[in-house]
Structure formats: structure tokens, C-alpha cells
Amino acid sequence: MDVRNKLRERLVAGEQSVGCWIHMCSNIATEVIGLAGFDFVVIDHEHGPNEMLNSISLMQALSATECTPIMRAPWNDHVYIKRMLDIGAQGIIIPSVDTADQARAAVAACRFPPDGVRGAAYPLVRASKFGFKTTEYMDGLPENILVMCQIESATAVKNIDEIIAVEGIDVLFIGPLDMSASMGIIGQTENPDFIEMRARAEKAIKAAGKWMGGLAVKGDPVDAMRDRGYDLITGVSDASLIRDAAIAHLGSLGRGNKLG
């Protein structure tokens, strides 16, 4: 019944961590991913169909592994974030953080008063093992909850220094597809203008000594991200792993469909 945040421990030790997005709502697939050795998963409530109840079963599936459950909120909503934390998320990715005020709201959602606005039901919820680990859980706060703000627009990059300066942010997580969309070049992640915009964000994050996360996309594979100093790297999802394995297997037999 461990409430330690193993992903934070890896980050503090200076170790790069590799994660997998969870979109399929399958506790069995998530268990396999954890057993395979991923350092963390992101249970996605923004672009995935996950809900609170099935997310509990996903985290239960990870309990016998070393894999840390992170959840992405659908929006910067303190009520939704509170529920994610109560069911046991050990980190929250908040999408579309464009300003320092939005970053402060994200941090506040993850902290109890007087430092934030998170509602208190800690002796009763899954995060404290339903009261069996209340003291350990509370003593580990706020460090054991990773607050991750997504930088995924030209506006966010413009305001990057002010966002980074907000106390309580642990990770700045670059979202390349939305960033390219905000520039009017959606999906063009090899476009020189996009590469320059992303590099501005990366430079500011590393200069501030913050942990940096991101998503591998076309023209920017995992190895390249590792070389640029990313601390958290996501290159696959549960669905993409199954899809790509199926394509490879059928392709070896001269059969199957191709990606469009």
C-alpha cells in the first residue's frame, strides 16, 4: 500500500522517464503496459474516453507494478482535478495553460487551503488508501503530487517566463500538435517556424531548471527528445501499440490495412 510517488523520485534522481498514454479504458492492457516497464502512464481525460470509475480500475491494475499513474484533466477545472486527486492520481497534466494566472489556478487546484482550493475528504478517499495511509499521504504533500502544465500554443510560449515563475509547477509539458495548430500550421511538426517556436519553449524551461515533458511526433522521435534533455517522454499510447503491432504482423503476411 505504497503512496510514494516513484516518478518524482526518478525525476529528482535525474533519470529520464518514458510513459504511455492510456486511451482504451482497458485495465488489462494497462496492467500489461505497467508490467512491460513503462515508468508512468497518462490516463487521458482530455482526448480519451476515460471516466472516473474506469480510471480507478486502471490504477488498480498498475498497483503491482512500478508504473506511476498520471492523469490529464479535460480542462483547468478545480472540481474535476480534485476528483482525479481523490481517486489516486499522483500527477495531473493540465492542458492549454497560456498565462501565469491559469498556471496559478492549476497549482491551487492541486493543493489544500490555505495554499490552494482543493476540497478536503482525505481520510475517506482512495488517495489515502481509504484512511489506512492518511498520515503518510498528508505528510507527503504537496511533493507527492506532480503538477504539470501543458505549453501548447504560441500564446503560452510568449508568456513562458511568467508561467515558469509560478510557484508549485513541477513539469512544463510541451504539446506539439496544439502548438502547431495555434500557429495555423496544424500537424506540420517539421515546419521550421514550429521547430523554432518549440525550441523557444524548451530553452526557457531548461534555463529555469524545470522538468520538461513532451510527446514524440513526426520529425521528432523519442531519441531526439532524449538528446534535447526531456525528462518525461511519451511516444506511444495503448491504442498505437496494438495498432502498430497488428499492422506489422499482418504486413509480414502480405495482408492488412495501412494508415491514412
Image: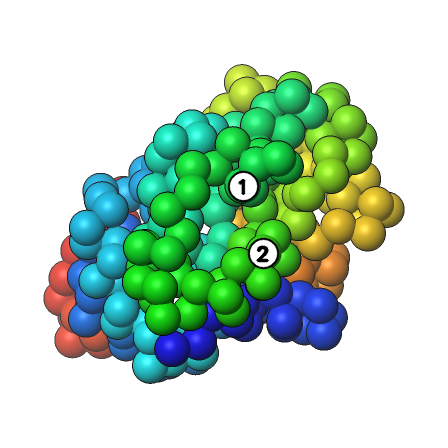
Work out whether mark 1 precedes mark 2 in sequence or the reverse, and give the earlier one.
1
Side (left or right) of 57 relative to 138: left
Res 104 visible: yes
The span from disc 1 to disc 2 (Cα, nearest Å) is 9 Å
Please provide percent x and percent y for residue 23.
Answer: 27, 51
Residue found at the far right of this picture: 207
Q: Quadrant of residue 165?
A: top right
* Residue at which label 1 appears: 112
Q: Quadrant of the N terminus?
A: bottom left
Q: Is residue 192 above or below residue 44?
A: above
Q: For mark 1, does the 10 Å Cα neighbourhood hold few (<14), some (14 to 19), or many (20 or more) residues?
A: some
- Taking depth in this image into account, of 145 and 154 the one nearest to the observer is 145
Question: Where does the image place residue 240, in percent across and percent down from the top left?
Answer: 31, 58
Q: Residue at x 72, y 74 (%)?
A: 13
Asked if marks 1 and 2 touch (Cβ < 8 Å), the reply is yes
Q: Residue at x 25, y 58 (%)?
A: 56
The circle on residue 260 is none
User: Which of the image's four quarters has the C terminus?
Assistant: top left
Residue at the disc numbered 2: 141
Identify which amino acid the numbered label 2 is placed on. Answer: Leu
Position of residue 60 relative to residue 170, above or below, is: below
Q: Is residue 246 above or below residue 50?
A: below
Disc 1 element: loop
- Residue at image point 73% right, 23% down: 159
**Whether residue 218 can be seen here:** no
Q: Is residue 171 left or right of residue 138?
A: right
Query: Which structural element holds mark 2?
Result: loop
Looking at the picture, which amino acid does disc 1 mark?
Phe
